[in-house]
Image (spheres, grey):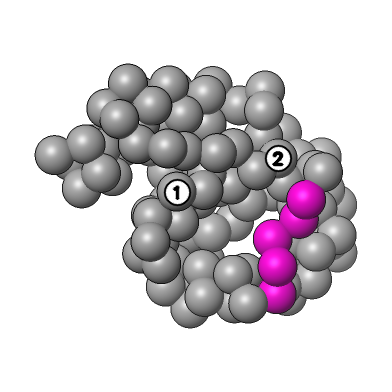
């Protein structure tokens, strides 16, 4: 299981901790060090659409209107931290965010 996010993100750290405590072998992939592959990015965009862009993030708030109007693929390539976090790949199934729905699906 891979958790795509940032190592200083509270939600990503909580997901990693709780999944580990539940016996899942989860690995955090820091988006600043290893951006999403094109295939994974395209799958996530197809599944989550506009929700993949975190419009409440500090990164988003720092962008000018021109950058904000860019295509989501271009945004994610140029600013990996603008992605909503965490993106969890559990055996090919993708989950976005660390909310009650994701916890129920992964923790049982």
Residue 27 placement (x, y as % from top left)? 55, 39
Count residues near mark 2 (Cα–Cα under 10 Å), then give few for <14, some for 14-19, many for 20+. some
Name the image quarter holding the C terminus.
top left
Distance between the alpha carbons at the discs numbered 1 and 2: 14 Å
Looking at the image, is 92 positioned above or below residue 28? below
Residue of label 2: 30
Left-right relation of 104 to 94: left
Residue drawn 70% across and 40% down? 30
Looking at the image, is 62 positioned above or below residue 15? below
Count the labels in the image: 2
Residue 62 placement (x, y as % from top left)? 82, 40
Residue of label 1: 1
Mark 1: which secondary structure?
Answer: loop
Magenta stretch, residue numbers: 34-38
Left-right relation of 91 to 69: left
Q: Earlier in the sequence, mark 1 or mark 2?
A: 1
Q: Quadrant of residue 37?
A: bottom right
Residue drawn 67% across and 23% down? 8
Mark 2: which secondary structure?
Answer: strand
Residue 106 vs residue 76, the one in the foreground: 106
Residue 24 placement (x, y as % from top left)? 35, 36
Looking at the image, is 34 positioned above or below residue 28? below
Q: Nearer the viewer, mark 1 or mark 2?
A: 1
Residue drawn 62% across and 69% down? 41
Left-right relation of 67 to 17: right
Q: Quadrant of residue 28?
A: top right
């Amino acid at each position: 299981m891979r958790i795509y996010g940032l190592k200083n993100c509270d939600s990503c750290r909580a997901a990693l901790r709780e999944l580990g405590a539940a016996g899942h072998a989860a690995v955090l992939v820091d988006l600043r060090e290893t951006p999403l592959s094109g295939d994974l990015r395209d799958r996530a965009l197809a599944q989550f659409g506009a929700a993949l862009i975190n419009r409440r993030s500090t990164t988003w708030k720092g962008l000018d209107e021109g950058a904000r109007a860019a295509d989501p693929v271009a945004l994610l390539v140029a600013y990996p931290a603008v992605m909503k976090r965490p993106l969890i790949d559990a055996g090919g199934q993708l989950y976005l965010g660390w909310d009650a729905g994701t916890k129920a699906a992964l923790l049982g």
